[in-house]
Amino acid sequence: MNKLFTAVTFLTASSLAIAGGHGGSMDHSSHASAAKSGSGVHFFGRLYLGYDNKTTGAADSVDNIRDNGGKSRLGIKFKENLGAISLIGHAEWEFDIADGTSGADSTTACTGARDCRTFDLHVGNLGFLTPLGYLGMGSYESPYKTMGMYDSNMDTALALNSHGGTSDGAFGIASTWDSSVSYHGAMGPMEIAYMRGMADDVGGSNAANVAKGDYAFGLRLKHIMPGLEFGFARAHDKSGASNYGTSNDKIFASYKVMPGVGVFYTNEDIEIAGTNHGAGDITTMGLHYTMGNNMIQLVAASGNMDTATTDYDTYSISNQMNLSKSTNLVIGYTRKGIEGAGNAVRTYGLGLTHKF
């Protein structure tokens, strides 16, 4: 508790000290602004490096300087006008500038050819933008991730999905789907997205991470009230335990209470267990408070798992200090406390991000 109080005090003091500087806002997109080449291809990227201190139960803490979430990215994109429709291309690679491997840790990541790559494809796709919406194929971040994903620390050591505060894995909020077709459309305040796996080759070290027939969809409503959005998303694994497969379902909402203050809520009905949670329900509530060039995130989450002894609570506090339009520094603390005999997981960390 003393450590948490110290973290809160430090973050509050930092906010007050820097308040009145340049206003900053969160960029929830997968990339920053891009430079444009003469050929019409846009190049973009993001460099991230973080320090984290992680303690599990009574074991000694472990320090690291790394980017295990693959937050560093290099990418290209283009849009070509074909008349009534446009061709859109997007390719984005993730990497770790601390240890040079695209996997989680340099000592354990090299278990297969794909994990040992310095650059690992995050998403890559081609598609057509038509009057009826976007239709394409390749690899994508699924609607289960892109709709209702409010964690500003995603892909860092402090991320909620790494501490059970939200789902994880291919069918959770961290989901990226290979070998899929994708549709995305919008009409007025309604936005809809659908993806379906198309690969029979699943399970090998270089094969698709979702099977043919797996699907994900999302429905989001915005601007019905100023500052309000809400919706529903599902990720379905057709090879699940039941005859009809299993699904992760998510209800989400966010509301801008006043300038600089927003609240958000997600409730996930989890049938597909991930690395940091079992099957059950995860309820997450949080607040974003912007003051000057600081954005503070406060989150409380609870996991009501099917196995009662693994119920848990997750708490997180962080502050993103925007040093410029392209660079920010994040410092924070996230704790997952498990009921019963489970070991609590506590992570302190800071990270520096530069977008270009």
Image (cartoon, rainbow, N blue to C red):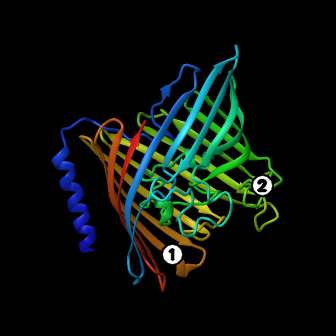
Residue reaching furthest top? 83
Within-10-Å neighbours for mark 1: few <14, some 14–19, many 20+: many
Amino acid residing under circle 1: Asp
Amino acid residing under circle 2: Ala
Q: In this view, does 243 lie to the left or right of 172?
A: right
Q: In this view, does 142 lie to the left or right of 50?
A: right
Q: Where is residue 186 in the image (x, y as percent from the top left)?
A: 61, 30
**Mark 2 element type:** loop
Viewport quadrant of the N terminus: bottom left
Q: Name the residue under label 1.
A: 311
Within-10-Å neighbours for mark 2: few <14, some 14–19, many 20+: many
Q: Is residue 333 left or right of residue 284?
A: left
**Looking at the picture, does residue 268 appear above or below residue 192?**
below
Residue 53: image tag: none
Nearest to N terminus: mark 1 or mark 2: 2
Residue reaching furthest bottom? 341
Viewport quadrant of the C terminus: top left
Q: Where is residue 221 in the image (x, y as percent from the top left)?
A: 54, 37
Q: Position of residue 275 (x, y in %)?
A: 58, 68
**Looking at the picture, does residue 145 appear above or below residue 349?**
above
**Mark 1 element type:** loop
Q: Which of 141 and 205 is in front in this view?
A: 205
Q: Is residue 7 left or right of residue 85?
A: left
Residue 300's image quarter?
bottom left
Number of numbered discs on residues? 2
Q: Which residue is drawn at 56% across and 52% down?
A: 251
Given this view, does label 1 or label 2 mark the residue nearer the observer? 2
**Looking at the picture, does residue 312 appear above or below residue 86?**
below
Q: Where is residue 33 in the image (x, y as percent from the top left)?
A: 45, 31
Q: Which residue is drawn at 69% across and 33% down?
A: 126
Q: Name the residue under label 2.
A: 211
Q: Which of 239 and 138 is in front in this view?
A: 138
